[in-house]
Amino acid sequence: MKKVLAATALAAVLPQANALPLVDFYAGGYYWDQSYSGEITDSSSEVDLEDNLNLDGVGNNVFYLAFEHPIPVIPNIKVKQTSMSTEGDDGTVTASFNLGGTSFTGNAFDVMSEADFSHTDFTLYWSLPLPIVTVDFGLTARQFDGFVKMESETLNQSAEADLNAVVPMLYGKVGVDIPLTGLSVGGDVNYIGLGDSGVTDYDVNLTYVLPIIPLLDVGLTAGYRSFNFEVDPDDFGGSDDDLAAEATVAGPYFGLSLHL
């Protein structure tokens, strides 16, 4: 809400005006240091992401844009893209396993793997008009565009199971500005429980706004994000060859935020 000069000019031209429809734009991104745990499953067995696939903990990027306005009945809009991909070398699977319709059969075989749980969030939300405190609530549609691949030189086989689904979730955010410090603390969460599937994605963060550019808030942010999901493709209209998994991706992040 930093269009003070524009509001003053318009009030001079239109003395009868009682209010000016002001808007806020937000943008930012952060580097997320991710660790992976959990398993992928078939109808009779499971493969552990750490112990069997040996997936590496890696860093990936997250970017977001948001647009807010003062019209109460129309939701604000936020789009966030999260990269979430890693690879695993020198893994070992100790039992037969079916991935994407391909059966890997053996008591123990080597695997090289690649996992991608990347997704894009499209969020519609409303904000309560409170001083100092931020309270947002709304709905998110999360578009997954991922997969898990496995390749075994021992068996001379490779396979891939897709994770392509749109998952609706509840969205909430809270934050508090600490007066006269430039600091704010906050957190947000997305959640759904549906059939045998569920997603809980939350982060907590601390932001410091640099007092360097008039009319533009430039913030340095540090936080922690945890993404926990259990996906059964039957709950989202998928097939038996799509990915079934239960996993957690979590770790600290550091980034930059802009507010105009």
Image (tube, rainbow, N blue to C red):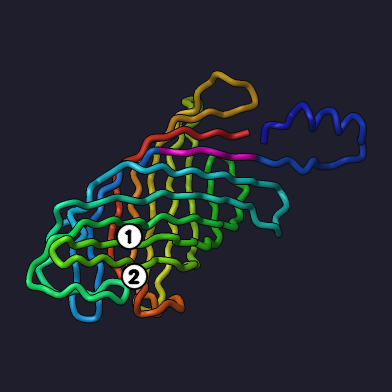
**Residue 203 x %, y %:** 38, 48
In percent of width and height, residue 196 lies at 34, 77
Q: Secondary structure at mark 2?
A: loop
Quarter holding residue 259:
top right
* Numbered circle sitting on residue 228: 1
- The residue carrying mark 2 is 243
Which mark, residue 20?
none
Q: Give the magenta range.
A: 25-30
Q: CA distance from mark 1 to mark 2?
A: 15 Å
x and y percentages locating residue 185 in the rendered image:
43, 39
Callout 1 secondary element? strand
Q: Is residue 193 above or below residue 145?
A: below
Nearest the viewer among 17 and 34 is: 34
Residue type beneath disc 1: Asn
Dot 1, crowdedness within 10 Å: few (<14), some or many (≥20)?
A: some
Q: Earlier in the sequence, mark 1 or mark 2?
A: 1
Relative to 189, 92 lies left or right? left
Other residues around mark 2 within 10 Å, as few (<14) / some (14–19) / many (≥20)? many
x then y, percent, for residue 63: 49, 43
